[in-house]
Amino acid sequence: MTPLWPPIASHYAAHVDALIWWYTLVVVLLTAPVFILIAVYALRYRRGRVADRRLKTNSSILIETSWSVIPFLITVAFFVYAAMLFFGLHNAPANAMTIDVEGKQWMWKFEHPEGQRELNDLHVPAGVPIKLVMTSQDVIHSFYLPALRIKQDVLPGRYTSLWFKADRPGRYRLMCSEFCGTDHSLMGGSIYVMQPGDYARWLRTAGLDASLAVRGASLFRALGCSGCHTGQTGSAAPDLAGLYGRPVPLSDGRVVAADDQYIHDKILTPNRDVPAGYPAAMPTYAHQVSEDQILELTAYVKSLESANGGTRP
Amino acid sequence: MTTADWANVETPEEKVSYLRAGHTLRSWLFSTDHKRIAILYLLAISFFFLIGGLAAAAIRIELISPTGVFLSNDAYNRAFTMHGIIMVWFFLIPSIPNTFGNFLIPLMIGARDLAFPKLNLLSWYIYVIGGFVTLYALIMGGVDTGWTFYTPLSSLYANGHVVAVAAAVFIVGFSSILTGVNFIVTVHKLRAPGMTWGRLPLFVWSHYATSLVLVLATPVLAITLVLLAAERLFGLGVFDPSMGGDPLLFQDLFWFYSHPAVYIMVLPALGVVSELVAAAAHKRVFGYWFVAYSSVAIAVIGFLVWGHHMFVSGQSPYASAIFSFLSLVVAVPSAIKVYNWTATLYKGSISLDPPFLYAMGFIGLFVVGGLTGLMLAMLAIDVHVTDTYFVVAHFHYIMVGGTVTAFFGALHFWWPKITGRLYPLAWGRVAAVLIFVGFNFTFFPQFILGYLGMPRRYHIYPPEFQPLHVLSSAGASILGLGYLFPLVYLLWSLRNGKPAGPNPWDAKGLEWTTPSPPPKHNFEEIPVVTEEAYAYPPLGEHSK
Amino acid sequence: MTEDLVVHEPYAGLEQQREADYLGMYVFLGSEIMLFGGLFAALFTVRLLHPQAPIEAAEHFKLWLGAANTAVLLTSSLFVALATLVVRDGRRRTASVLLALAVVCGVAFLCIKGVEYRLEYLEGLMPGVGPKISPVRSEPAGLIVDLYFIATFLHAIHLSIGVGLLATLAILLLKRDGAAPPRPITVVMAGLYWHLVDIVWIFLFPVLYLPRP
């Protein structure tokens, strides 16, 4: 059986649907006269039929202006509402639970905060804001959840994010919507929206993998990062403890926030945006670490708490 | 006289026509006559329309089943890529300008030819060379990037003949640029005495606006393709994030061309419909200046909306908001045209001959395409439906429902002028209805598919979408018949059609003052224009 | 004044024909500007993403050869400008000499550019060819270097076309007399094209060679 409307799994989706319904109604009202009048005129004034065809005017600035300005103002009202929904989509609540997403030809990899990993399927709790931090190993993909009416391209070499709060438990489709090569149409799976209790149970049973941060820690040593980032005052490289989320003054006077993107970029292009007071001495790891491993390293850096209370492996 | 008697009858007009000025192949291939070059273009683009149509047929057959019918994933990807590339660059962009624009602009403004006749011929040869390179790439196995060539898929990962196809599109771009230069100069400098800007037919206005876009947008595509080819061949990394480049830069540059390119495709169609509506109603177009300037406004604002293709690409949301707003602005001049055409019909004397049925079909389909375009310009809606069949349906309503319908309308309107023969009008009406019905069956279900969440460029798709896909494929077979049918009776009319006479539709415009087909140099004497365009006599109280 | 004596097919008069030629050339040059505009947009984007990259890349470019080339090209434009002035007065021989001088400048530019390319090839700057180890330290600077090659090569192609054009005109002006082609308008058109190629270089030079910390 073919559905004629997609499932609605969130309040946001219901808002988008309302927007499209109202908007469709308005544009139909704006254009119905065009269709009706064309039909009426084609009949009433068809060639050979006797009719009164005397005409007063054949152009009118008043008419032209009103039928361009009034529809325009109506659409602007919709524009404002649509833009507000859109900006909401770009401002994740602070308490959102972060799930890392990685696209690669032709699969999706997910990693939950406690380190559980999934391939192509994603389990999330209902009623909890979820923030997806996404990147790609190869080409551009696009993470698409039709039931939530959301979509975001996933790019190599940078993070994009998307957040949602699914309200209605169930199983919905999850797809790649940016053409990405041979098996593009097979790149997808399901998103399972679960009651929080069910989700907690699922987390426990879903074969617990070593958590991201733990693997990040061993990488941190294996790659030799710990050689310079010793955490001691006076060492050649900045202390990373408590760094995440903090503002970092740069040598050129600007200040940036140490977010996921910043840490990602520092690993790949370390000598851009050098922090104030340090030499541009770090080598690039662009060809040594995968995007996977960068996620792990980032998780490790996040896990380091500031100065004395730090947890060090 | 019976139909058979018309065969081989040579009217006095035909004896001196451009068609009779030389019968050798050479007299065609080296002709600088804009009318002959228009015919050369007509043949060439029809060929590519056929190839692109075959690819479309393969796609529609393949999608009848959710698991595919006869193509592999790679073959399917190559099919839709070639469909897009051939239809966009080898059919839609040159379709109306290079055939009807070429044929009619000099006739409509009272000139003997375009400003640079040799350049015009050169532009056709460049088009043909580009076409051969595409065919080469097609025969060697095609390309699988989608017509949008997004990096890094196209530069680093795709295994088709990306460089060959990029070269073909690069080459055909120069054909566009030369045509654009030619039209702009012709309209500026070769208007007959008395043919002021305010007396230009709206067809000429819209081609003038189109030419501005052709000249200013196409070179940006050219340089983008050079950078893409360099990335693929030499490992240059401007679009490669692993080397510090930016894949979004490619999208920005590509859409900076490709969004205006949509207007290259649709503006000439809008010009055609203005002519058809005026001739159908036997009335001057309502609000001439609004319609004329709306073409220029579309061309100018069209340069500022490319980012609406990139709302989910990772572009800044603030940029997205601005592009969204400007996309609503660019819809205003299009809406003005639609309202003005409707007002033109009011108290007209409306003919329902085939060209005018196409014009009305165009208005209907263009309105649906335009309004769904407005939906796509709304940020939150676009996030859901971009890269789905909703977008596919939307741009097919504009490009096929709009441009191709207008192309067929133009073909039916000016066919008697071009060939000197009339085709059977009843058959023409049947074809127009067939195309309209087939089109809606093909593409309307795709709006629903898109809103349901069916992504575009999917070979294998979830089974719940099958009924709508089957409906679409069934519609496509009606549409295909609708497109083939005119080929039959138009070719038939070449030998058997009644001589058309100079003005079979009783229409206004300088092109209708010449014999059909027109003589080699268009006008014995350059006409002096003393009245506005569409100066139809006023209709009375009890007129028919 | 021996101005444009032949009226060609679609035109009613000399004046109309000349205006059409001018307009056609200007529109075409507008198109050319958009072509190079795409490259400048790419250079600008890389610079925004990596503010240090152009500075590092500039260290590898041969500033003095580039500067010399700028002087050579500006001089050539002077010759072309003078040639378009004298040819309208029917002084075809003088015009021919001036165009020849411009051609010499153009060829000199290409030779200097060739020397630059050779040096850069030996240093391993060229993408895809030459020594495998590039002296460029960072990848973003490598992007600027690559764009430098594309931009200057595209410019050199345009210049070579210009050299061919001017050389042909110089010879024709010398060989034929009076009303025979080339018409003075043709020299003016070629001159416009030459100036555009010159102006493109005037923008490329500072953008590529002059960035400093």
Image (spheres, coloured by chain):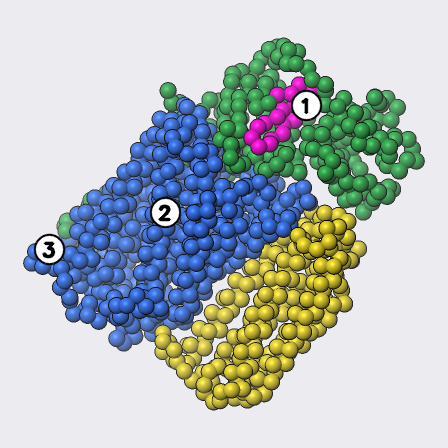
Chain colours: A green, B blue, C yellow
Is disc 3 on the same chain as disc 1?
A: no
Q: Label 2: few (<14), some or many (≥20) within 10 Å? A: some
Compared with A257, B263 (above or below) is: below
In the rendering, which numbered label is found on residue A95?
1
Q: Which residue is mark 3?
A: B3
Is disc 3 on the same chain as disc 2?
A: yes
Residue at image point 9% right, 59% down: B5
Q: Which residue is mark 2?
A: B51
Task: Report whether residue B326 is seen.
Answer: no
Residue type indicated by callout 1: Asn
Residue A173, position as x, y percentages in the image? 50, 23
First in sequence, mark 2 or 3: give its number. 3
Q: Secondary structure at mark 2?
A: helix
Discs 2/1, front: 2
Compared with B386, C45 (above or below) is: below
Residue at image point 34% right, 52% down: B47
Q: Label 1: few (<14), some or many (≥20) within 10 Å? A: few
Q: Which residues are magenta?
A: A96-118
Q: Tag 2, which chain?
A: B
Instruction: Indicate left or right for B297 with C58 as reference.
Output: left
Task: Report whether residue B133 is seen.
Answer: yes
Predominant secondary structure in magenta? strand
Give the Cα separation between the discs numbered 2 and 3: 34 Å
Discs 2/3, front: 2
Q: Residue furthest left?
A: B1
Give the Cα separation between the discs numbered 1 and 3: 82 Å
